[in-house]
Structure formats: C-alpha cells, structure tokens
Amino acid sequence: MLLHAFPLSSLVWDRFVPLVAPDARVVVVDLPGLGRSATPGVEPQMTQVAAAVVRVLDHLDLATATFFGLSTGGYVALELARAAPERVDALVLGSTTCWLVPPDDPDERRATADELERSGSVGCVLDSAADGLGPTAQHEQPDLLPLLRQVISGSDPAGVAWIARAIASRADTATALHDLDRPVLLLFGAEDTGTPPERGVAMRALRPAAATTGLVVLEDTGHLTALEQPFRVADVLLRWLRVHHLLIEEPA
C-alpha cells in the first residue's frame, strides 16, 4: 500500500506503480482530505488517518500489507506500526522521521492550517512543490514541478488544512519503530535537505535487529524519491521484498 506525501495525492505514484505492479498487488490511496478523499468530519488526528487506511484494508479483505510511506505517508505508516502492528507485514519509510522535528514542526503545521482556512486558498503550500524536488530532478525533469503545482492547486484548502492539523497531532513513534518485529527499509535522497539521510541513519540505530533493517540513500535524488527516481526505487523495493520473502513468486 502506497501512502503519499503532503500536500499531494496518489497521482505522485503514477510513474512508479507500473514498475511494481507486475510483481506485486499494489493499493494506492489518497489520504483523508487530499486527492479524491473527502475531508473527514472528525477531529484531525493522525490516529484517524491511520484508521482510514485500516478501513481500506478491511474493505479489500486484506489482513495485512507492506506499507510504503513517503514523507507524511511515513508518519501514517509509523502510526499503523504503533496502533495496529498486526496489520503490518513490513514498512518502507521514505524521506520521513519518527520524531517530532522539522520540517513538520507541530506549531508550524497548525499555523499553515490557520492560513489555509483564513485565505480559502492553497497558495501558502504551493512552494512545497519546489521544496520536494532535488536540484537534479528540477534540472533534468522540468515537467515534475508543474505537475506537483497542478496537484496542489487542485486540492481543497479545507482538506489540506485538516491533514495539516492531523500531522501536527502525530505522536513520537520511535518506540513503535524500535519494537516492530517486521522488516523495515529506510529510503532517503542524498539531495534532501529537509529530511536528510542522517535521519535514516538515526532511525536505523533504533532498530535492534540489523538483519531486518535496510538503509538506502539514492544519489542525485531529493525528497520525493519514488517520483524523481521511479525505476531506481522500484528496483530497490522489489529486490528488498524478495530478500524478505514478501512477494509471492508465480510458478514457472
């Protein structure tokens, strides 16, 4: 199950899914308030975001899944590891963190939500499109920045505000990451300055079983790894899933 970044939508996975789908069943969701998902009529909480993901699993009659959470999607995946570890086969955590640190400082996210609600516009989060891309991607793939700006511009300001407040509510999940007895892959971009690879090194240090924890840093890549480098990320992911017997191989 693929969980996208803030303030984007499942569209950011469009180039990645065809590279993985021949080998695995892939489920893509829009997080609450973003993309085609409605804004929930409940208090914004990360626990509510995780509960919405569990409802998708239940709807599809899936007991468990491997969750690939990118940035904010990683917060959701870690909340699932904290609240419902029995639903987790494995975690792929891309460009994210288990600690309450920038760039998702809770007070700053609440201030962003206030501005979204006050202005009724997503203008205050449009710059996150450029922030999400490394300099190599911006130079070599000039189509990506307009795509991200288009996704954000099409978002409902109320929905973006709701998810921003949910991000602000998230708990520290370092203990959940430490305690999860499932494989974990940490995936970071070398050009990501907001969530640098050093975060991945620190998160790997939390894990007691090194054999079940991988760390991959992609050169020439920024924050949105699977968007910027879909072929490389798909190759890393599929190799890792096979090592941990998380893919069902079809008989020859």
Image: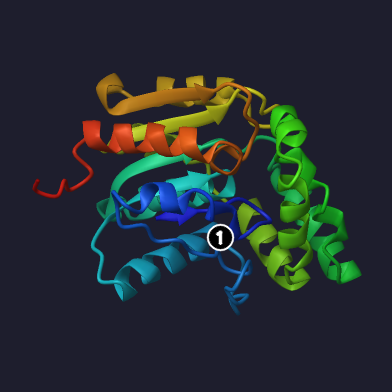
Q: Position of residue 30 (x, y in %)?
A: 54, 65
Seen from the viewer's position, the closer of residues 147 and 152 is: 147
Instruction: Identify the residue shown where x is 72% and y is 33%.
Output: 140
Residue 176, can we see it?
Answer: yes
Seen from the viewer's position, the closer of residues 9 and 40 is: 9
| Residue 161: quadrant of the picture | bottom right
Q: Position of residue 151 (x, y in %)?
A: 71, 61
The N terminus: image quadrant: bottom left
Instruction: Identify the residue shown where x is 57% and y is 20%.
Output: 198
Q: Is residue 248 left or right of residue 127?
A: left
Q: Is residue 14 left or right of residue 191?
A: left
Under mark 1, the amino acid is Ser
From this view, report whether residue 112 is shown above or below residue 116.
above
Extreme residue toward the front, this view: 252
Residue 181, can we see it?
Answer: no
Seen from the viewer's position, the closer of residues 109 and 71 is: 71
Q: Which residue is mark 1?
A: 10
